[in-house]
Image (cartoon, grey):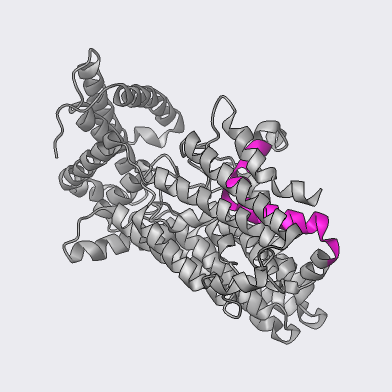
Amino acid sequence: MNYLYFYLPYLFILFALSLPTKPWFYPGSQPVYLSITLFFVLLQSFIFYNKKKQFINEVSFHKYIPTNWIIASFYFLFMLCFPILNRNWGDGLLLLETNLLETKLFGFQFTLDEILESILHSQLMNGLSYFQIQEDPTVSYSILSYLSGILFICGFLFLGRFKQKDLSILFLLSSGGILLGFGYAENYTLVTTIHLGLYLFLNRYASDPKDNDILLYGSTSIVALSMLFHLVSGYLVILLVYLWVFHSPKAKKIKHLVYCTLLGSLILLPWFVYFSAFHDPTVDKNSTHLIHPPFYPLKRWVSNNHLKEILSVLYWNAGISTFYLSYQFFFQKEKWKQFIKYPFHKLMLVVILAFVLHGFLHNPQLGFPADWDLMGFYWLPITLLAFLYWKQESKIVWEWVPLQFFGASLVMIAAVQLNKTNPKDVLIWEITKKAISTYSTENKTFIQSLPKEDKKFFAKGDFLFFKGDYITQQLCDFPEKQALIESMKSHRKNWKQGFLDGTFKSKDQLNVFLTEATKTNVLYLKSLEANTICHPKL
């Protein structure tokens, strides 16, 4: 029975590839997946056969294993060679466009959802432009993504520094979440790095009851900091409550509650208050998820489609680690009970449950694969638990090695595929950068004259119509082209007038305008999809 369990990942991929529509988490070609699966099935079978016949001495083979540092170094070179350039994974061009537009107009991008993440990407781009490096947010996102990738790898290597030749690093390298470190353009790389820092901190202090002050105050500080990077870290408050209940002595319960509340508030509130009320411009309250949280409808929390989404993200982000831990839970119950007794391991379970709750509650509005990163924050604690369980083994369990390399191979195949770009997307991004530069030059003065609470909202809508006009003019001729251009010009004129005469202070008037503008924008997107660019202005 146990042997059959090891073949389930191979059978699953064969089943998935036989479906009429290939799942999003297999972006590579079917022949490649079939070849790699067949190879590892044979390798898996060979290892089982050798375990029975013992014609190869596993102990003597151990000296030929490269250290985790060497494996990680070669993997990082692979990361540099194949950055994620496919803009269908993540927020794509819209994220880059917003970052560049707000940086050009206001100095840096900021939003209450991810204050420090967006600011740091903008400020790095400003710093690079000072040294005559092209103003392009893809560069700053890539740099910070690779920095996060280095820290992911170094964090795991640090935890496993006392056992270097055990292949444990493969748990990290076989997790789809590692793609956050492949030069990936998204606002989830830095916050995940902060989470790793939190887990390393917990690993250091959770086991010593004498350090309960350091544990609670330090954890509160790191969680609050991570919330400044991204609000999804708010689910870690569940971890803080657990720490307070089980790690705060009875004599200090009230003290820890008050001090931790004050400490978290002192870290968070000044940023939110400043950008909500005092900064010029203030945050765009129409677009922040803090005010408009996208919760999944209650009646759909437990539904086939929602469960399929959650399991798909789990498989993609931490499939091998989850499978490994599941095996230990079902077939190694006594060892599992001993493992999970450690305070830090219990804390990781709490973190996993917190982010699984996020998976159930949050509505991934872009769908998949676009929201694979937002919905998969549990990949890191799951991977870390699998890594630590492997570390406690007295010797390498060779039956798992083919699956570890199989998982790493799937991630590498995906990276090679996601490194490919659509030439049209590249051209549109180059044109969009030019449009942003032109727009900011022509309109920055007027935008600065608006009230600070209107600036970001106006600029976002105004540029939408400007860009629609600007790019449509560069498309090949089609029957509706001129009418679409005139419609964009008209919307832009009415948008500006609505702010000047105060019409849009009425929500009803604003909603009527946005409804009509949305119809035009849908037509623009369809025309952009259907037509090629014949008259590029670069």
Dominant secondary structure, magenta: helix
Instruction: Answer with the quarter of the image where residue 304 lies.
Output: top right
Q: Where does the image place residue 222, in percent across and percent down from the top left?
A: 56, 71
From which residue to which does the magenta span run? 307-334
Image location (x, y in percent) of residue 260: 65, 74
Residue 248 against residue 376 in the figure, above or below: below
- Indicate left or right for 24 with 82 as reference: right
Residue furthest out toward the top: 479
Q: Is residue 468 positioned above or below 290 on the image? A: above
In depth, the one of 249 and 453 nearer the eye is 249
> Does the segment drawn in magenta span residue 19?
no
Find residue 482 and report its horizontal and vertical position in percent: 20, 18
Q: Residue at x 21, y 28 (%)?
A: 533
**Percent from the top left, x then y, of residue 531?**
26, 22
Q: Which residue appears at 56% of the width and 66% of the height?
A: 169
Residue 522 seen by the camera: yes
**Does the stretch in magenta take in 312?**
yes
Q: Nearer the viewer, residue 505 or 192?
A: 192
Count of marks overlaid on the render: 0
Question: Can residue 265 be seen from the camera position used here?
Answer: no
472 or 517, which is in the foreground?
A: 472
Instruction: Say whether residue 433 is left or right of residue 351.
Output: left
Q: Residue at x 46, y 47 (%)?
A: 413
> Which quarter of the figure is the C terminus placed in?
top left
Outermost residue, right side: 334
